Image: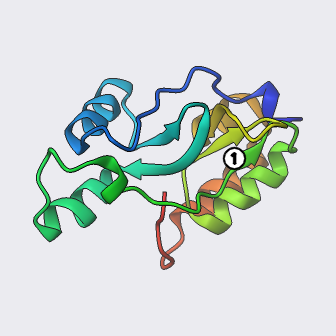
Amino acid sequence: MKVSNVMTREVETVRPDQTAREAASFMLSSDSGSIPVTEGDRLIGMITDRDIAVRGVAHGHGPDTPVRELMTTGVVCARIHDDVEEVAMRMAEAQVRRLPVLDENERLCGIISLGDLSREADDECAEHALEGVSAEGGQHQQ
């Protein structure tokens, strides 16, 4: 099964010049712990609730800090034509619950989450991803 068959196509994004408060508000309304950061339709990073709390609040940054100062760059991504099993392994290795999905032109076209895998892919695929995400250690980057 391909990522394009299970991903979420409607993705909320933030720009790097928006504030941490705006990013947190988007996360709250979408019940998500992360949101892609884009310039136009190009993915340039991800910002997570952890980025806001650890990189932001713990280091004295306020809610009006620009997203660009807190976001994670070098984001692990999925491609629209990847197999979901391959993406589940990538999620497990990176210990992340969701991956942005890029099309053939490197444009953000969706996001795939553990929830998408558990609803649409086989149980083994979602189970493998969840085991990796739940494993101890590693740096949680997105």
| Residue drawn at the location 26% of the way across and 65% of the way down | 55
74 to 42, vertically: above or below: below
Residue 10 x/y as whole percent: 58, 20
Q: Give the farthest residue toward the top.
A: 10
- Position of the N terminus, as image quadrant, is top right
How many circles with numbers are drawn on the protein?
A: 1
Q: Is residue 124 left or right of residue 49?
A: right
Front residue of 66 and 8: 66
Q: Residues within 10 Å of mark 1 (few under 14, many from 20)?
A: many
* Secondary structure found at label 1: helix
Residue 69 x/y as whole percent: 31, 58
Q: Which residue is mark 1?
A: 126
Residue 129 x/y as whole percent: 66, 55
Residue type pointed to by label 1: Ala
Query: In the rendered view, how is the structure colored?
Result: rainbow
Q: Quadrant of residue 83?
A: top right
| Residue drawn at the location 60% of the way across and 55% of the way down | 130
Q: Quadrant of residue 80?
A: top right
Q: Quadrant of residue 57?
A: bottom left
| Residue drawn at the location 69% of the way across and 30% of the way down | 7
